[in-house]
Image (cartoon, rainbow, N blue to C red):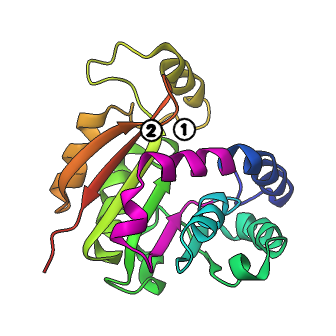
Amino acid sequence: WFDSDPEAAKNYTKAQHNGSLATAYALHKRLPELASDFPSMRMLDVGGGSGAFSIVTSRVIQDATAVVLDLPNVIETTKSIISEEEESVRSRVSTLALSATDPGSWENVQDESFDVVLLSYVSGSIPSEALAGLYSNTFRALKPGGKAIIHDFFLSNDGRGPPNAALWALAHISVNPTGMGLIPKRVINILSEQGFIAPRVHELIPGMTKVIVAKKKNA
């Protein structure tokens, strides 16, 4: 509905921003190796909304650059939020107005041009049949040795909890009725089918969200 309602897109994106900043800092605390593995990181922030994760990445990693990819109506608000950052940050965060879930729309994303592709709250917000194409595009965009980071509300592999993640998934059916119930092993299977290796699962927001980190094999 963001495609057809610019005002809703603006209000939602702004409302999410402060909470997303806190989560972005938590991500870097959970994955400190990102700064050492990629000191000049180039990150693609898919479905990046307000740009919070890209902004924090540029604050935390001095030489990092980031591209926020989201729908055109969202990107207008993203640009406004980025413009409020200090020059040293905003000069390293750019935007790309595209649909994350349309495989053809990634034609403007150069192959093997990013060290990290982040997908936060994207996998659970799209139809299940779009996941393979999304992860395929992610793989294509990564340099050899690059990493995909999938952050979302995940149930445990047995599907029995945690309760807060389950409640979120239930509520989200009204927005994404054809989405996949996210559990780590399902997502890891799809990532593996696209060529990713060495998946690792971390808890991020206790009892609610997890992060899956998977790697594109070195050339």
Point 74% across, 51% down: residue? 17
Circle 2 Cα neighbour tier, 10 Å, few/some/many (<14 / 14–19 / ≥20) = some
Amino acid type assigned to the residue bearing label 2 in the image = Gly
| Residue 208 place in picture, x, y as percent | 50, 27
In the shown orientation, is residue 90 left or right of residue 172? right
Residues marked 1 and 2 touching at CB (< 8 Å)? yes
Front-lying residue, 90 or 187: 90
Foreground residue among 102 and 36: 36
- Left or right relative to 112: residue 99: right
- Judged from the image, the secondary structure of the residue bearing numbered disc 2 is loop
**Residue 176: assigned label:** 1
Residue underneath mark 2 = 179
Q: Amino acid at mark 1?
A: Asn
Give percent across and percent down for residue 78: 74, 67
Q: Quadrant location of residue 75?
A: bottom right
Horizontal and vertical percent position of residue 144? 22, 77
* 172 up-or-down from 96: above or below: above
Residue stretch rendered in magenta on the structure:
21-48
Location of residue 109 (image quadrant): bottom left
- The residue at the point 48 percent across, 71 percent down is 44
User: Judging from the image, what secondary structure is the residue with disc 1 in?
Assistant: loop
